[in-house]
């Protein structure tokens, strides 16, 4: 078992992602655990030392994502940067959401019918100003605009805004917190993890 500081472990994994298609050494595909402390800070480890950690699982360990070539990871940076500037959001955050939502696949369609890079539901297309959800720019602009609205609604609380993006504002308002849905909890953790990684890559 590796006893490496989590930030170094993830930095190595992320550098492999950006460097192109490659394999993951056995040690780097170790299981990842996480917990959120009383201040809302998310902690990760591949060698947990506290019962507060819980298994994050392979879905959010980025083992699958590491096989995508760097051209796919960076293919929409110009669009993301434009959307971020237009709507006053951080580039790294929008990129993290796209990574979590669709793994940079503009043609992705979820089992629930969400479409494109930021996984927009068909019934929300008009409200988000999206005419073609499969068009990367249209999709990212609409998704970023919606996230901005959620951030304003929840007083810049990123975790609640992400939860509302995933589960809907109604669920967040009902629980006055991240809804206790495994999918939503995992989604928020995944986006925050990617967000941290991208911020570390772009200081």
Image (cartoon, helix red, strand yellow):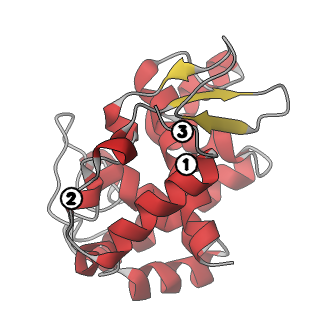
Q: Residue at x 38, y 47 (%)?
A: 28
Residues under numbered marks 2 and 1 in contact, where contact means CB atoms less than 8 Å apart: no
Q: Residue at x 35, y 50 (%)?
A: 101
Of badges 3 and 1, nearer the viewer stands 1
Label 3 Cα crowd, 10 Å radius (few <14 / some 14-19 / many 20+):
many
Report the quarter where the C terminus lies: bottom right
Q: Residue at x 34, y 67 (%)?
A: 17
- Per the rendering, the mark at residue 193 is 1
Q: Looking at the image, tell me whether mark 3 or mark 1 is earlier in sequence order.
A: 3
Which element is circle 2 on? loop
Picture coordinates of residue 143 (x, y %)? 44, 61
Q: CA distance from mark 3 to mark 1?
A: 9 Å
Q: CA distance from mark 2 to mark 3?
A: 27 Å
Q: Which quarter of the figure has residue 31?
A: top left
Q: Looking at the image, tell me whether mark 2 or mark 1 is earlier in sequence order.
A: 2
Of badges 2 and 3, nearer the viewer stands 2
Is any part of residue 153 visible from this angle?
yes
- Per the rendering, the mark at residue 188 is 3
Residue ranking furthest to the top: 51
Residue ranking furthest to the right: 39
Q: Identify the residue under disc 2.
A: 23
Front residue of this view, candidates 162 and 103: 103
Of badges 2 and 1, nearer the viewer stands 2
Q: Is residue 36 above or below residue 123?
A: above
Which element is circle 3 on? helix
Front residue of this view, candidates 58 and 90: 58
């Amino acid at each position: 078992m590796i006893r490496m500081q989590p930030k170094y472990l993830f930095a190595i994994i992320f550098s492999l992602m950006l460097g192109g298609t490659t394999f993951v050494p056995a040690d780097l595909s170790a299981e990842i655990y996480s917990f959120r402390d009383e201040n809302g800070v998310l902690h990760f480890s591949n060698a947990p030392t506290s019962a507060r950690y819980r298994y994050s699982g392979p879905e959010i360990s980025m083992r699958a994502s590491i096989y995508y070539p760097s051209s796919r990871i960076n293919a929409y940076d110009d669009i993301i940067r434009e959307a971020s500037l237009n709507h006053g959001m951080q580039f790294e955050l929008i990129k993290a959401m796209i990574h979590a939502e669709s793994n940079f696949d503009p043609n992705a369609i979820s089992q629930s019918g969400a479409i494109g890079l930021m996984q927009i539901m068909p019934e929300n297309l008009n409200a988000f100003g999206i005419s073609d959800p499969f068009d990367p720019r249209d999709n990212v602009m609409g998704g970023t605009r919606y996230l901005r609205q959620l951030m304003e609604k929840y007083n810049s609380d990123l975790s609640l805004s992400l939860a509302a993006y995933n589960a809907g504002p109604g669920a967040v308002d009902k629980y006055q917190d991240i809804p206790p849905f495994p999918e939503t909890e995992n989604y928020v953790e995944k986006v925050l993890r990617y967000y941290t990684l991208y911020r570390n890559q772009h200081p």
